[in-house]
Image (cartoon, rainbow, N blue to C red):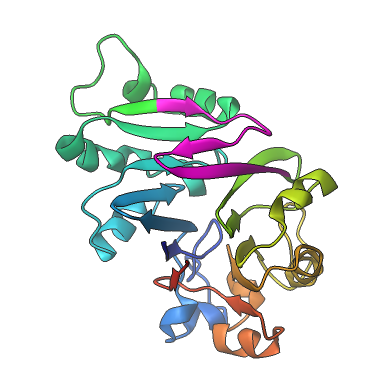
Amino acid sequence: MKIIFLGTGTSTGIPLIGSNHPVCKSLNKKDKRLRSSILFKWKNYMYVIDTGPDFRQQMLRYRCERIDGILYTHEHSDHTSGIDDLRAFCFKQGEIPIYAHKRVLNNLNFRYEYIFKKEKKYPSAPILKQIEIQENKDFFIYDLMVTPINYLHASLQVFGFRFNDFAYLTDLKTIDSNELLKLKNLEVLVLNCIRLEEHYSHLNLKEALVLIDLIKPKKTYLTHISHLLGFHDKVEKLLPKNVFLSYDGLEIDLP
């Protein structure tokens, strides 16, 4: 299996519009971050977690010619607002399945009525098959079993996902001990870490490192990063030896 980080930035991306912060002016490509998303592929299958506002740019950048489905973590715009650009894949492939909590599906139906309404549907809208993810219920995408991980982003429920020995958790602030049990024996954990100072709905660096120490994966890659975390190269030098900052375009090969 291969994991490709399509974007590793927080909701504003880096550089932040109008900002004179030194990180926003950095010439290092690793300090330029689109909104957070990953592509994972195995055999001939290709799936994406979240379609943020940079989805079209990400698909063009990585020359993606096919998408077999989308997993959604939650409904916030930095994770969903690129949904209309699935139309290009639908033109070639037809219907594409999307997987999300029932609340998220309802939210998308409201915000993008022209995509989901059954009568007088806009002719060139994406053709999407809605599949509900339920708490504590594993599901399969083709031959790959996916375990949803349930946690809170401030007071909003969010799903992370585990498949094989890999887990992707973004927009996490608090997680129940029962959910932590689902994250044992990971080879790779991807975990959000927004900045150095405490944040009301995201882990900061200190909190992320505490959680990593509880989960004990072999390797962790931090994502959903803001410019307030600091320069990529400087921050990574301060991290434990098994913790790394992800960056746009990073690829990981898993067994």
Q: Can residue 73 be seen in the rendering of this structure? A: no
Identify whether 180 is placed above or below 31.
Answer: above
Give the magenta range.
Answer: 130-151
Q: Please state the horizontal and vertical placement of residue 7, each as a whole percent of the image.
A: 45, 63
* Vertical placement of residue 246 versus 235, above or below: above
Relative to 145, 34 lies left or right: left
Q: In the current view of this chain or complex, which residue is farthest to the left?
A: 92
Q: Quadrant of residue 233?
A: bottom right
Which residue is depicted at the point 47% across and 42% down? 71
Question: Residue drawn at (62%, 85%), measured in percent from left and top?
Answer: 236
Which quadrant would residue 245 be assigned to in this image?
Answer: bottom right
How many labels were placed on the picture? 0
Residue 173 in view, yes or no: yes
Query: x, y percentage for residue 92?
Result: 15, 39
Which quadrant of the rendered structure holds the N terminus?
Answer: bottom left
Q: Residue at x 25, y 29 (%)?
A: 125
- Left or right? Give the position of 27 relative to 64: right
Q: Nearer the viewer, residue 122 or 51?
A: 51
Residue 144 appears left or right of 75: left
Q: Position of residue 247 (x, y in %)?
A: 48, 74
Question: Foreground residue, 72 or 253?
Answer: 253
Classify residue 47 as left or right of residue 180. Answer: left
Q: Main secondary structure of the magenta part?
A: strand
Image point (68%, 34%), residue name: 136
Magenta stretch encompasses residue 212: no
Q: Is residue 146 magenta?
A: yes
